Amino acid sequence: MSDPCCIQGSRLELHIQDDSISQRVMLVMSDWSSGYVTTTEYIFSYCRELNPLRCRLPLLYAGYQPPEIRHACELGFGQGLGTAIHAAGSVVDWWATDFHPAHAGFAQQLVAAFDGSARMFDQSFEEFCSRSDLPEFDFIGLHGVWSWISEENRRLIIDFVRQRLRVGGMLYLSYNTQPGWAARIPLRHLIDEHARVMSPPGNSMLDRVRDAFAFAEQLVEVKPAYMSANPQLTEQFHWIKQANAHYLAHEFFNRDWECFSFSRIAASLNAAKLHFAGSANPLDHLDGLLLTDEQQRFLEKIPDPVYQQTVRDFVLNQQFRQDYWIKGARRLSERQRHEALRQQRVMLHIDRDRVHLVNNVSPGEIAIDPEQFAPILDCLIDHRPKTIAELEAELESEGLGFCQLLSGILALMSKNILVPVQEDSLIGRVKPQTGGLNRFLLEMSQDSDNIVHLASPVTSGGVVVPRIQQRFLLAMTQGEGSPEALADRVWTKLDPGERNRLSQGHGELKEAGLAKLLDQARQFVTQLPRLRALGIV
C-alpha cells in the first residue's frame, strides 16, 4: 500500500479560481423510468473520468497495461454532452444509451453537428444490452448510475460486461460507498419516506423534496439522540439542505438507491472476470498524501487486496468511489512501466497564475511539498504539451526525481490542473470534429447558459468555457478581435434582462453595462493563449 513516490514536506493546499456554474434541472418521476428520477430539462454535466485518454497515467502508475481503445460504450449518458465531446475529440467508435428519448434526441443532434458516427440510443439497459450488432468494447463506462438503479439492472450490466468487454478491456464504475455514507443512510431513508407518505397528492417532486427537508430540519431542532450520536451529521445536514433542490431530488429520492462496500462490488464484478486496477482519481494512488505513515503500515499488513481496499475506505471515510476494472489485467515490468510513463504527454490546463499554493491549511487536509509543484507548473507555463521524459530532463537541476515528478503530476491531474494530451497525428484528425461540435455549442450559447464545456482536440475532453466567454468566441468567428469590438458585438445580442443585470438593475444605463462587458472581454482575451493551446480557438 505504501507509495514509493510519496510527497513529503510542508502542508499545502491547491486553490483554483473558477467561474461559478449555474445549471437548471426539472426532475419528475414516471412509470417508464422504473422508479428513477427522470428529467424534462436535466443538467448538461460532463465527467472527465469517462474520457478514455485519462485512464493511461493512473493505470501505468499502478503497473498495468492500458487497453488500446477502439470501441467504447457509455451506459446512462444523461444529455450525452460528455459522450459527444469524447467522440468528437477522438477516433474511438462510441456506442451509448440513455432511456430518456429527449436526452437521446439532443445527443443525436450533438453528434450530427460534427458528422460523427457515434451511436446514441434511447433504449433501456435491457434493450441495449441485448442488441446483436454491438462490437466487443475496449472501454465501458458508467458514471452516477450504479447506486441509483435496480438490482435487476445491475445484474443486466454485469452480464453485458461479461459478454461485451473484450479481454484486456476496461470498465469505469462510480458509486456511493460506505462508510462515508453510513451516518447519512437513515437520514436519506427518513426524507425519502416523508416524500412518499406525507406529501399531499399531486405535489410536484420538487415540492416533495422541499417539504421533506423542512420536516428534517424541524426534527434536527428537537435534538434527536441519533444526531447526538453522530455529531458530524449535523454539519453535513446543514450543507445538504442548502443544496439545489433538483440535485437533492436526483441524489436522494430515486426508488432504487444504495451504497456499496468495495468488497461487495468486487464480488459482483468477479462474475464478469474483472480485476480491480485502481482508482480513476489520480490522487487516490498517492497514499503518501492521503494516509499517515501509521495508516500505511497498518494497511500493508492486510494480504488480501480486496479486503485491504475495504479497510482503506474506513480509514479515509470514503463516500464515493471511481474505479477502473480490467478483464485479463496484464502487469508491466518496472522497465516497461517507466518507459511507457516517460512517453506520456501532459499540459497545463489552466493559467499558471490561477493556481495558488497556500501553506496554511486546515487539519486533515493534504500535506504536499510546495517546492515540488512550482517547478512542474513553471515548465508548462506556455501550455505546450511535454512528455514526462522532457519534464524529467528539464527538472533534473531542481533535484526532482522521476518518482517525485510522477507523484506531482498525478496530484495536479487530480485537480484538473494538468491534463493528458493525445498524439499530434490524432489531434489533426479530430480538429474538424471538435470544431463542428463547438460551433453548434457556441450557437446554443446565444439562448442558453446550460452548457459550459467545449471540446478540445488536444485533450480529447471537455474544457470549461462559461457562457459569456462562449459568446465572445462566437463574436470572434464573426470577425471581431479587440475587446471593445467583442463587447459591442455581444451587447447587441443580449436580451433586455441580460442587459439589465449587467447594468446592475438600471436598464437605461447602457454605459455601465457595456463597461462591465468590456472588463469581461479583456479578461477573456487573456485566456486566448490557453484556449488556442487546447485547440478551441
Image: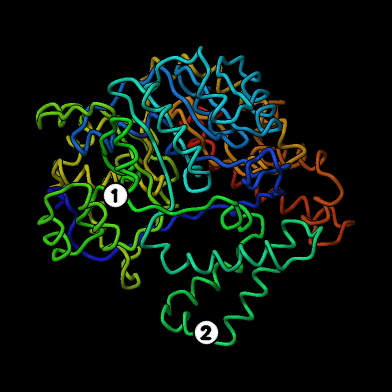
Identify the residue at horizontal 81%, vertical 58% (top origin): 202
Q: Quadrant of residue 482?
A: top right
- Looking at numbered disc 2 in the image, what kind of residue is underneath it? Pro
- Work out which residue is located at the far right of the displayed protein and give it: 508
Which image quadrant is residue 387 in? top left
Relative to 146, is 301 on the left or the right? left
Position of residue 456 measured from the top left corner of the image (x, y, whole percent): 50, 29
How is the protein colored in the picture?
A: rainbow
Q: From where the camera sits, is residue 357 visible?
A: no
Residue furthest to the bottom in view is 222
For the image shown, how many numbered marks are present on the structure? 2
**Which residue was labeled with disc 1?**
263
Q: Is the residue 413 above or below the residue 434 in the image?
A: below
Q: CA distance from mark 1 to mark 2?
A: 32 Å
| Residue 157 image point, x, y percent | 45, 32
The mark nearer the N terminus, 1 or 2, is 2
Q: Position of residue 31 (x, y in %)?
A: 70, 42
Q: Is residue 488 left or right of residue 360?
A: right
Secondary structure at badge 2 equals loop
Q: Is residue 240 visible?
A: yes
The spot of residue 21 in percent (x, y) is 61, 51
Residue placed most toward the observer, 259 or 45: 259
**What type is the residue that disc 1 sits on?**
Ser
Residue under label 2: 224
